[in-house]
């Protein structure tokens, strides 16, 4: 598959910045939000957003935005197709009741991952709201789910998209 | 991931990699237990049949809770009222259950190899919940996990199994699991209750508990069947208690952080004294909790051949 | 009826003969020649003629268990295997502990059997091991040995009496040597495999203890003892020592005891459940040595048919026993002759002249003129795969299903009549 760059290191950073900005504008009281990343690349993206918000909103030492990770394997609707995936940790180290959750994934495509992630979150309690942030929105959604904060939109229904993060792949970038 | 078997019949058939996969898979399930909703939709629409030919409370309950927490539909086949009494063969019973679309059959049977027979003849996943003197693989896995959780490793640990090794499927599954993961396993008990060829599994044999207990990191105490004294396997419960009961005094001879385990149900005052069972070294209740998480992991990891295939 | 088998290699261990020539059959007898033209000429080129096989240990299940085997189906299977004479065990229903049942078996064999059948009578009434059966009357009815087979006689005094009493009839006493207390609840060989499988084991000593006792009693009484289905290395050496001392004892083993180890039990295959149980490699080696040095005189099948319903059970519940008529020669050829353990002639002696001598079967086990025309014709190049479908026996409980064999019987003649042909 051709490795066409959609986002390079710089535009990757810009996209994160855009999302962080939109979240800050949207949430007057930043202390009410919590960020939850979906394994695996959603977690990296979520961490970057968290750092960006902390810096942009200038809340550095005073306050730490609650952060969680979430694995949807046990909630998937296609387990039978899969070669038993490794389950990663779902860690929500805060009380989600009445929190404004920002759910973060790398790519929004069919919407099924997000559907499952919503179910996982609901099993932890009753958040005030859940909003969705994604680095790339590929379009071609199969469920009535849309992202509230989008890094870039890039319609590519048939192809594939690969997100790489410094933490796991040594470089930030998005390829198709 | 290597764990792609249809059935779990015994730990003998698993390799180190499979065991590590199980160990790594348990934690996410255990973390569910502290949530407000302790359930996931993983096995929604799947049917789990519990086919218990031997009485069992804890294993059956543990499997049932595990399956229900994964949202499976659980059916208990009551053996007393079933067609077994009418002389139906095990294979026919299995085929009938499969015709009712059972995806998983969890079987306990007094005869070794019964789960194997079912697995050979059915497409459903068969999980051995204890067969004769053969194996009790989920108990072996939950014991392994409990040790792993507490000691953070298995390799190099000295694990001592105490009591009736000859008639113990729990001992067998523990020996396979622990030796495959690199632990040093020893058994102690009267020679009449230790199989002649056990050393061929890489196990050290002791007859003197006081000697065996000294270097142990883990002591797993097996239930002694009181009937065995009538088969001339030991002279009396009185003598057994004298020679092999794990007591607080004997625990003092072991390593200070020794884990005390028991697969249950315990005969307090026989194979284990009450003060040993209730001591801070005992992880007997953790074993029970872990049992559910381990069985959830097993249900998750096994792959029944049947199953809806979505186009996604 | 005159039959001539032309240009065939004739191997007759009873006379230590091995040559290429013709066999002449006049009616039911082998003759040295005949002047008139043969009614039937069989071209024997490339094949080997040997005496028809004598199987001294088999269960025909008739009367009483016709769902497993009948005299008809059993003798068909035997004919396919080259067996022309069967000694059948008395554990039918009713047991052959009385003259009418013995006579029934003999008459039914004459009526529908394809091969010769000689019944073995019970040594004790109802095979209970407490009172002698009417051995003299049974002998008149036609039995040629006594045995309680699967119900070994635990009482040593009774065993002594049997060995003593049978002396006057010159009847061999066949001992299924098993200490039932040592083997109690056991279903396979006791060893590493039984421990791993969680199945109760039968120690070798369950067999060896009883063989030792029976040999001592044979020494005491001068009775004639024949040890059935030797399965362990220890048994072989005990029997070897006894023979050295001149005690009247003979012994048999079965093809599965020199072919299979208890490794094959590993998938809980009930077609490997047999009594005595399959042992280990060192036992196989000792049995082969025992066959080579003559400690073990003959090879029998212990053909023990069981229905699929009975075998398709939990290992503990399935009955002991496997069928063996149809594979006896191929196993002997592949496991003993092809591997150089026995010469062809010596291998054939274990299923022909040796059993004929032990059980005084006059005119059988030989191709000498004047003998009964019981002949097996062997093609060492005939290769085939044993499948459930091509098993002739009514029961299919063979551990060898799926195995390829090279060399087998292509024609069987009983008393001058061709009863089976490939």
Image (cartoon, coloured by chain):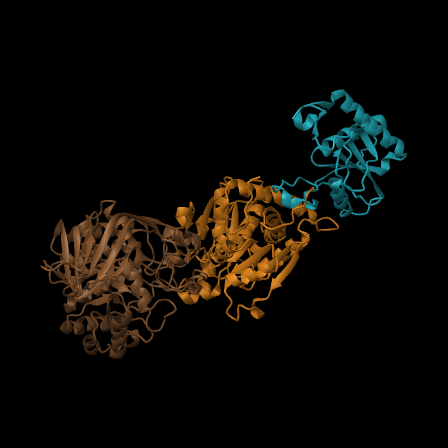
Chain colours: A cyan, B orange, C brown
Query: What residue appears at the point 63 percent right and 40 percent down from the top-left corner?
Result: A86
Q: Does C297 sit left or right of B152 as displayed?
A: left
Q: Does C390 sit left or right of C81 as displayed?
A: right
Q: Is residue C72 above or below residue B158?
A: below
Q: Does C209 sit left or right of A72 as displayed?
A: left
Q: Position of residue B39 (x, y in %)?
A: 71, 51
Q: Which part of the image, by quadrant, shows the N terminus of chain B?
A: top right
Tell which of C19 and B137 is nearer to you.
Answer: C19
Name the image quarter holding residue B55: bottom right
Residue at the limit of the structure toward the front, as seen here:
C37
Tell which of C265 and B169 is nearer to you.
Answer: C265
Q: Is residue B122 above or below residue A73?
A: below
Query: What residue appears at the point 26 percent right and 63 percent down from the top-left corner?
Result: C57
Q: Does C412 sit left or right of C188 as displayed?
A: left
Q: Position of residue C54 (x, y in %)?
A: 22, 61
Tell which of B8 and B139 is nearer to you.
Answer: B8
């Amino acid at each position: 598959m051709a490795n066409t760059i959609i986002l390079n290191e710089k535009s990757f950073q810009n996209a994160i910045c855009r999302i962080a900005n939109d979240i800050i504008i949207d949430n007057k009281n930043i202390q009410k939000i919590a960020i939850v990343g979906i394994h695996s690349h959603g977690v990296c993206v979520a961490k970057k957003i968290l750092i960006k918000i902390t810096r942009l909103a200038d809340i550095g030492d005073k306050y730490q935005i609650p952060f969680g990770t979430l694995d949807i394997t046990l909630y998937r609707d296609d387990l039978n197709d899969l070669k038993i995936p490794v389950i990663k940790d779902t860690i929500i180290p805060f009380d989600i009741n009445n929190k404004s959750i920002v759910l973060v994934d790398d790519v929004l495509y069919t919407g099924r991952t997000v559907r499952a992630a919503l179910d996982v979150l609901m099993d932890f309690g009753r958040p005030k709201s859940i909003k969705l942030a994604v680095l790339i929105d590929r379009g071609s959604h199969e469920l009535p789910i849309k992202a509230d904060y989008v890094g870039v939109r890039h319609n590519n229904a048939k192809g594939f998209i690969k997100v790489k993060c410094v933490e796991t792949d040594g470089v930030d970038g998005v390829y198709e | 991931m290597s764990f792609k078997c249809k059935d779990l019949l015994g730990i003998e058939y698993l390799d180190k990699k499979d065991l590590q996969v199980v160990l790594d898979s348990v934690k996410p399930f255990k973390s569910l237990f502290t949530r407000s909703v302790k359930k996931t939709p993983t096995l929604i629409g799947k049917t789990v049949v519990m086919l218990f030919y031997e009485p069992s409370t804890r294993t059956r309950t543990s499997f049932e809770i595990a399956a229900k927490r994964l949202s499976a539909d659980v059916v208990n086949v009551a053996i007393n009222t079933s067609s077994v009494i009418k002389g139906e063969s095990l294979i026919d019973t299995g085929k009938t259950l499969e015709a009712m679309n059972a995806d998983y059959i969890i079987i306990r049977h007094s005869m070794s190899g019964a789960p194997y027979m079912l697995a050979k003849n059915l497409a459903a996943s068969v999980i051995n919940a204890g067969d004769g003197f053969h194996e009790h693989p989920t108990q072996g896995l939950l014991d392994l996990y409990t040790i792993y959780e507490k000691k953070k490793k298995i390799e190099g640990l000295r694990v001592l199994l105490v009591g009736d090794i000859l008639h113990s499927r729990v001992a067998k599954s523990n020996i396979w699991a622990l030796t495959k993961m690199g632990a040093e396993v020893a058994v102690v008990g009267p020679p009449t209750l230790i199989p002649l060829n056990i050393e061929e599994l890489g196990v050290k044999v002791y007859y003197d508990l006081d000697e065996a207990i000294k270097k142990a990191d883990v002591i797993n105490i097996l239930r002694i069947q009181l009937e065995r004294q009538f088969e001339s396997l030991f002279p009396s419960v009185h003598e057994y208690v004298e020679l092999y009961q794990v007591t607080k005094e004997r625990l003092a001879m072991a390593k200070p952080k020794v884990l005390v385990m028991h697969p249950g149900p315990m005969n307090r005052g026989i194979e284990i004294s009450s003060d040993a069972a209730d001591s801070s070294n005992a992880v007997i209740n953790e074993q029970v909790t872990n049992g559910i998480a381990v069985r959830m992991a097993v249900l998750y990891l096994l792959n029944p051949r049947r199953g809806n295939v979505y186009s996604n | 009826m005159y039959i001539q088998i032309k240009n065939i290699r004739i191997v007759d261990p009873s006379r230590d003969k091995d040559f290429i020539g013709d066999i002449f059959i006049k009616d039911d007898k082998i003759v040295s020649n005949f002047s008139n033209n043969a009614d039937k000429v069989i071209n024997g080129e490339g094949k080997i003629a040997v005496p028809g096989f004598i199987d001294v240990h088999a269960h025909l299940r008739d009367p009483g268990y016709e769902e497993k085997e009948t005299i008809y189906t059993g003798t068909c299977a035997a004919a396919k295997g080259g067996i022309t004479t069967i000694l059948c065990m008395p554990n039918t229903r009713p047991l052959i502990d009385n003259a009418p049942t013995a006579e029934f078996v003999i008459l039914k064999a004459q009526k529908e059997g394809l091969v010769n059948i000689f019944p073995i009578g019970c040594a004790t009434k109802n095979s209970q091991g407490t009172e002698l059966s009417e051995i003299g009357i049974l002998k008149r009815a036609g039995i040629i040995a006594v045995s309680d087979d699967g119900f070994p006689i635990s009482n040593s005094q009774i065993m002594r009496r049997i060995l003593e009493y049978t002396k006057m009839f010159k009847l061999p006493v066949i001992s299924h040597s098993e200490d039932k207390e040592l083997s109690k609840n056991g279903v396979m060989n006791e060893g590493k495999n039984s421990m791993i499988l969680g199945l109760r084991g039968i120690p070798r000593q369950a067999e060896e203890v009883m063989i030792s006792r029976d040999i001592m009693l044979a020494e005491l009484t001068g009775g004639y003892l024949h040890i059935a289905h030797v399965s362990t290395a220890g048994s072989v050496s005990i029997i070897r020592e006894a023979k050295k001392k001149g005690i009247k004892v003979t012994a048999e083993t079965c093809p599965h005891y020199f072919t299979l180890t208890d490794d094959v039990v590993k998938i809980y295959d009930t077609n490997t459940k047999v009594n005595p149980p399959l042992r280990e490699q060192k036992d196989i080696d000792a049995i082969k040595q025992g066959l080579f040095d003559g400690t073990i005189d003959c090879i029998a099948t212990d053909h023990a048919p069981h229905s699929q319903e009975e075998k398709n059970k939990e290992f503990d519940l399935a009955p002991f026993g496997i069928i063996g008529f149809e594979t006896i020669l191929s196993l002997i050829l592949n496991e003993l002759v092809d591997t150089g353990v026995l010469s062809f002639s010596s291998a054939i002696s274990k299923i022909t002249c040796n059993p004929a001598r032990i059980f005084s079967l006059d005119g059988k086990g030989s191709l000498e003129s004047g003998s009964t025309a019981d002949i097996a014709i062997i093609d060492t190049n005939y290769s085939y795969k044993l499948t459930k479908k091509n098993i002739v026996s009514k029961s299919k409980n063979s551990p060898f299903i799926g195995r390829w064999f090279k060399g087998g019987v292509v024609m069987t003649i009983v008393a001058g009549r061709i009863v089976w042909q490939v």
